[in-house]
Each structure stands twice: as structure tokens, then as C-alpha cells.
Image: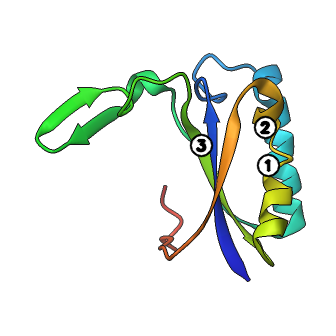
Amino acid sequence: MAQYAILIYADDSAHGPEATADDTAAHDEHGRELEESGGLVAAFALEPRDVATSIRGDVMTDGPFVETKEIVAGFYVIEATDLDAALAVARRNPVLGQGGGVEVRPVAGGFVRQDGAQ
């Protein structure tokens, strides 16, 4: 089966340090549904934008690369039979009902360390 990365775009990470269980409930439930479907390969929520550091050439700055309303707040990788199936999964992401968006991209290759370290 093909793998697809689903990038989550939002104002910021829903899983920030001050996030409550209510703040993350819809996202956590979506994650459980993906895991139970058997198609989830990996999922990662990113820390808020204020702890990001960007490097471009010899210049290092705090924050994401560009000044924009939305940032990549997290991503997950799924296995799906085709792009249409991956899009159907992506359409269920709760960020879409919260003013954010998702981007679906086929995975060209990758690596997951198997020793369990994070």
C-alpha cells in the first residue's frame, strides 16, 4: 500500500504546554480512530511556533520560515490504497472544522528508527 503524509496547518499547535484535555479532545479522538483503522504509520504533534528555529543558508532565526497565519502544527503518515482513500482520511481531521487545513502528499521514502527511542 502507498504511504501518504498528512500535514496539519493551524494557527499553532493544539498540543501546546497550556493545552487542556478539552483543547486536544477532538485531535486525540481522531488519532485513536486512525490507530484503530490499522492505516496509521506514525503521528507527531509539534510544539508551538514560538519554540521553532529556522535555518536558511547562514541565517538562523526564531520561529517558522515565513510570517504567516498558519504553520505546520503536526503531521501523520498513513497507508492507503490510493490518493482518494488518503484524502478521505484527511477530510476527517478536526483542524478543518477549526479554521485550519491539511495537505496530503505521497511519501517518496523514509526511515523510522526501530529501537523505540524518541
Check disc 2 and give the amino acid type.
His
Mark sitting earlier along the chain (3/2): 2
Residue designated by label 2: 27
Q: Vertical placement of 43 versus 74: above or below?
A: below
Q: Vertical placement of 30 versus 68: above or below?
A: below
Image location (x, y in percent) of residue 53: 31, 33
Image location (x, y in percent) of residue 88: 86, 58
Of all residues, the one furthest to the left in this rendering is: 58
Q: Is disc 3 surrounded by few (<14), some (14 to 19) or many (20+) residues within 10 Å?
A: many
Where disc 3 sits, the SS reads strand
Which residue is nearer to you in this view: 68 or 16? 68
Residues at discs 3 and 2 in contact (Cβ within 8 Å): no
Residue 44 can be seen, yes or no = no
Q: Nearer the viewer, mark 1 or mark 3?
A: 3
Q: Is disc 1 surrounded by few (<14), some (14 to 19) or many (20+) residues within 10 Å?
A: some
Q: Which mark is residue 31?
A: 1
Residue designated by label 3: 74
Quadrant of the rendered image containing residue 63 = top left
Quadrant of the rendered image containing residue 52 = top left
Where disc 1 sits, the SS reads helix
The CA span between labels 1 and 2 is 6 Å
**Residue at the spot x=69%, y=79% of the render?**
2
Residues at discs 1 and 2 in contact (Cβ within 8 Å): yes
The CA span between labels 3 and 2 is 11 Å
How many labels were placed on the picture? 3
The answer to whether residue 19 is left or right of residue 87 is left
Check disc 1 and give the amino acid type.
Gly
Q: Vertical placement of 81 versus 15: above or below?
A: below
Residue 21 can be seen, yes or no = yes
